[in-house]
Image (tube, helix red, strand yellow):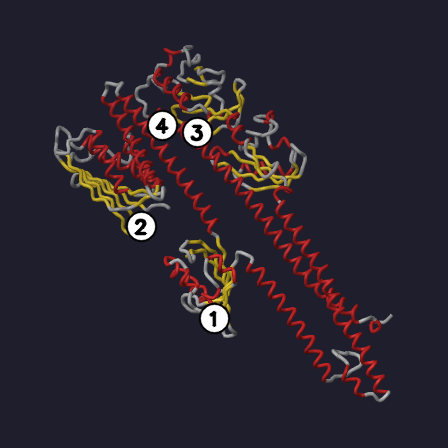
């Protein structure tokens, strides 16, 4: 059978199905591959972000534990009393106030604490050397003390000693308890004299980490820098004994090397627990070089991707089947009529042969492609067929309009004029209380319903997009309904241009997103309350610490000890005041530093019982707002320099002035603290002194990337310049 012998219906169906199938296949393959690839990338990105979020969370916990060790070591540096009993009470109280700790301790080099090691050989909390090495712990239940062991070889002591920096140990087993130690060196005059540290049980870490789940069966666990398991939700016996290298899986070994080098990433591998394919996401924890590992089965991570792929394939197959049926019906509609025309004209030709030429006029002829060349009847038939196609198109348009009007999306055509004169709007504009006629008649312009506070901004941004040659404009803003309600809507607009690039009209849609905006506002409000509560609690806790320092100072008779406690109390107070001001601020991230300086200096004058008739305070402070990272060190600097002036510059009732200037020029801040009292001693180098206060001033100035100058030409003047790091 030759091609010409095939029926016209078959050819039409074949042409349509093959052509549309080719187009649909190419477009569907492109769409499916693009969408699935994007969804897979999004799934990976979400999992990576989850792993990073968990890592940041546990990094904060580890920083808090290290901060306790740092504070303990810092206290020992300036602890001149050298009272072993008092120190033991302090370590014991530290365990009581921090129940998540299982041990607190200090360890000193021979005779480095008080030079009396020989008097304490073999006594409680001491070993045969008499060194002051008390280890307070709750490993066996109640709080008890024993001497530190293996300090001449163990990482918890030798690490800080050799490195002279903080150390977080690898997990280790002691008296049946699996733990991690946080240790900080005690450095006096540049020499190592001992350590201060705390121990944290891995049971505490394991409970927190193992409680986290991801998707349906995914889970989270933690490892040390050397790959040793610190937690595991299923195999508890692996904790502290097994490492990632023990799994004998090459890809997991690669991940272990990345973790050791502080690198995050992910691998596709086999889960040693379930023997199933999983994706492991690992992220380092900055403090202690630990890492979080998130294990997720790919079928759960890509469940949404597979669902979208299946839906797209189903749509593609349905489209092919539907177009095949449509091609059959379209071909049938043509070929059936052609068959009828052929039959009719055979009758006409037969009548013509018989001489009946008028019979032709009575035939309803449409289009005959094979027997009639061209003629009036063909034109009329073509017009008739065309009119039917127009009717079909009109019905399709009617259905599309009905679909739009039954949805929440309102369709607009706007003129390129201010306030958006409307050329067309869908009937569902009634959901906002307005009628179709109000817009089409020009009685209401679209710009009239945009909220007055948003109207200019919306128009300016739309014109900016148009001026830059962009084709699309997207924005969220408010409109006012007919009854006066305010609703949030999202606008998507296509900027239509002519061949010369001039704007002809704007074609767009608006969608009511009020519920989404309200939900987002609720979440923001909840976060603000949570942040305020954090600042409030920190402020309260610091005030408790300040009060405890004051109460402790009452126990001592020596003025030097009392002054040290008062200085520490004022430093804590300066930090607590920052959290109080942040709690009262509007944005919870910056505070009115002028108001802060006034409150801080008022407290200092009261703390040192200064007679303001003798010592006058002059404040020349510009209204500026600073973030917490700058406010804390700057507040301590002001506290130290002002306290120093109050203590040393005005002896024997001498009168004078203390002046504090704080100004901003462009992005440069200048803090000047001066006094007219006794000049700063010539024999003291303020940048290299044993005074804790001046050390804090120098170090904290460096911390904020500032520069400090001392002018002794007229009294004493400290000048600090810096830029705030945002």
Q: Is residue 478 left or right of residue 692?
A: right
Number of residues whose C-alpha sits closer than 10 Å to that of mark 1, classed few (under 14), some (14–19) or many (20 or more): some
The answer to the question of whether label 4 and label 3 lie on touching residues, with beta carbons closer than 8 A, is no
Instruction: Say whether disc 1 or disc 2 marks the residue closer to the N-terminus.
Output: 1
Number of residues whose C-alpha sits closer than 10 Å to that of mark 3, classed few (under 14), some (14–19) or many (20 or more): many
User: Where is mark 4, residue-wise?
Assistant: 74
Residue depth check, mark 4 versus mark 2: number of the one nearer the observer: 2
Q: CA distance from mark 4 to mark 3?
A: 14 Å
| 652 versus 435 height, above or below | above
User: Where is mark 1, residue-wise?
Assistant: 503
| 311 versus 656 height, above or below | below
Instruction: Identify the residue at horizontal 58%, vertical 42% (top origin).
Output: 266
Instruction: Identify the residue at horizontal 46%, vertical 31% (top origin).
Output: 62
Q: Is residue 14 left or right of residue 666?
A: right
The numbered disc on residue 65 is 3
User: Where is mark 2, residue-wise?
Assistant: 667
Instruction: Say whether disc 4 or disc 2 marks the residue closer to the N-terminus.
Output: 4
The numbered disc on residue 141 is none
Q: CA distance from mark 4 to mark 2?
A: 34 Å
Task: Label 2, secondary structure: give it.
Answer: loop
Q: Nearer the viewer, residue 437 or 130?
A: 437
Task: Label 1, secondary structure: give it.
Answer: strand
Residue 682, quarter of picture: top left
Residue depth check, mark 4 versus mark 3: number of the one nearer the observer: 3
Q: Nearer the viewer, residue 139 or 358?
A: 358
Q: CA distance from mark 3 to mark 1?
A: 63 Å
Q: CA distance from mark 1 to mark 2?
A: 43 Å
The answer to the question of whether label 1 and label 4 lie on touching residues, with beta carbons closer than 8 A, is no
């Amino acid at each position: 059978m030759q091609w010409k012998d095939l029926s016209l219906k078959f050819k039409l169906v074949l042409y349509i199905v093959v052509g549309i199938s080719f187009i649909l296949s190419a477009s569907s393959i492109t769409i499916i591959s693009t969408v699935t690839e994007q969804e897979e990338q999004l799934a990976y990105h979400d999992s990576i972000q989850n792993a990073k979020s968990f890592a940041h969370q546990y990094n904060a916990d580890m920083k808090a534990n290290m901060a306790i060790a740092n504070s303990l070591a810092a206290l020992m540096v300036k602890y001149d009393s050298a009272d072993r009993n008092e120190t033991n009470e302090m370590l014991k109280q530290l365990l009581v106030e921090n129940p998540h700790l299982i041990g607190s301790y200090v360890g000193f080099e021979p005779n480095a604490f008080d030079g009396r090691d020989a008097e304490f050989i073999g006594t409680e909390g001491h070993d045969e050397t008499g060194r002051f090495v008390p280890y307070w712990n709750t490993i066996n239940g109640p709080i008890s003390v024993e001497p530190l062991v293996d300090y001449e070889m163990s990482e918890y002591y030798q690490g800080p000693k050799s490195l002279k920096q903080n150390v977080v140990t690898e997990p280790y087993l002691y008296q049946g308890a699996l733990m991690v130690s946080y240790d900080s060196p005690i450095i006096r005059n540049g020499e190592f004299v001992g350590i201060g540290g705390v121990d944290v049980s891995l049971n505490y870490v394991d409970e927190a980490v193992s409680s986290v789940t991801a998707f349906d069966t995914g889970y989270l666990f933690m490892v040390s820098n050397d790959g040793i398991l610190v937690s595991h939700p299923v195999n508890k016996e692996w904790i502290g004994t097994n490492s990632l290298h023990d799994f004998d899986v090459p890809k997991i070994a690669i991940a272990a090397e990345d973790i050791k080098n502080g690198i995050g990433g992910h691998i596709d591998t086999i889960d040693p627990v379930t023997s199933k394919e999983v994706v492991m996401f690992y992220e380092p924890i900055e403090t202690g070089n630990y890492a979080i590992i998130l294990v997720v089965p790919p079928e759960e991570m890509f469940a949404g991707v597979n669902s979208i792929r299946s839906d797209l394939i189903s749509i593609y197959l349905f489209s092919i089947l539907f177009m095949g049926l449509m091609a059959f019906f379209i071909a049938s509609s043509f070929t059936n009529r052609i068959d009828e025309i052929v039959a009719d004209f055979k009758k006409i030709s037969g009548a013509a042969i018989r001489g009946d030429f008028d019979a032709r006029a009575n035939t309803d002829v449409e289009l005959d492609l094979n027997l009639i060349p061209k003629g009036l009847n063909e034109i009329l038939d073509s017009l008739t067929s065309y009119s039917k196609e127009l009717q079909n198109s009109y019905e399709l348009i009617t259905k599309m309009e009905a679909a739009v009007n039954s949805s929440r999306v309102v369709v607009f055509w706007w003129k390129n004029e201010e306030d958006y004169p409307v050329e067309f709007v869908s009937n569902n504009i009634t959901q906002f209380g307005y009628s179709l006629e109000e817009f089409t008649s020009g009685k209401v312009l679209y710009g009239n319903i945009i909220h007055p506070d948003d109207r200019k901004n919306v128009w300016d941004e739309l014109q900016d997009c148009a001026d830059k040659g962009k084709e699309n404009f997207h924005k969220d803003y408010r409109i006012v309904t007919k009854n006066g309600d305010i609703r949030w809507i999202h606008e998507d607009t296509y900027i239509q241009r002519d061949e010369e690039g001039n704007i002809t009209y704007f074609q767009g849609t608006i969608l009511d997103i009020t519920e989404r905006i309200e939900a987002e506002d609720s979440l923001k409000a909840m976060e603000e309350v949570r942040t305020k509560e954090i600042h409030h609690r920190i402020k309260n806790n610091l005030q408790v610490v300040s009060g405890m320092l004051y109460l402790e100072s009452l126990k001592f008779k020596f003025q030097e000890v009392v002054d040290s406690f008062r200085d520490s109390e004022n430093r804590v107070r300066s930090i607590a005041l920052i959290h109080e001001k942040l709690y009262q601020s509007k944005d919870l991230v910056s505070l009115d530093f002028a108001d802060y300086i006034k409150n801080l200096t008022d407290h200092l004058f009261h703390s040192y019982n200064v007679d303001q008739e003798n010592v006058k305070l002059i404040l020349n402070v510009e209204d500026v707002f600073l973030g917490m990272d700058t406010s804390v060190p700057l507040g301590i600097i002001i506290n130290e320099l002002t306290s120093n002036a109050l203590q040393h510059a005005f002896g024997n009732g001498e009168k004078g002035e203390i002046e504090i200037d704080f100004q901003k020029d462009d992005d440069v801040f200048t803090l000047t603290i001066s006094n007219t009292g006794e000049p700063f001693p010539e024999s003291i180098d303020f940048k290299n002194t044993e005074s804790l206060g001046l050390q804090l001033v120098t170090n904290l100035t460096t911390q904020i990337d500032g520069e400090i100058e001392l002018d002794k030409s007229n009294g004493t003047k400290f000048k600090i310049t810096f830029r705030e790091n945002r």
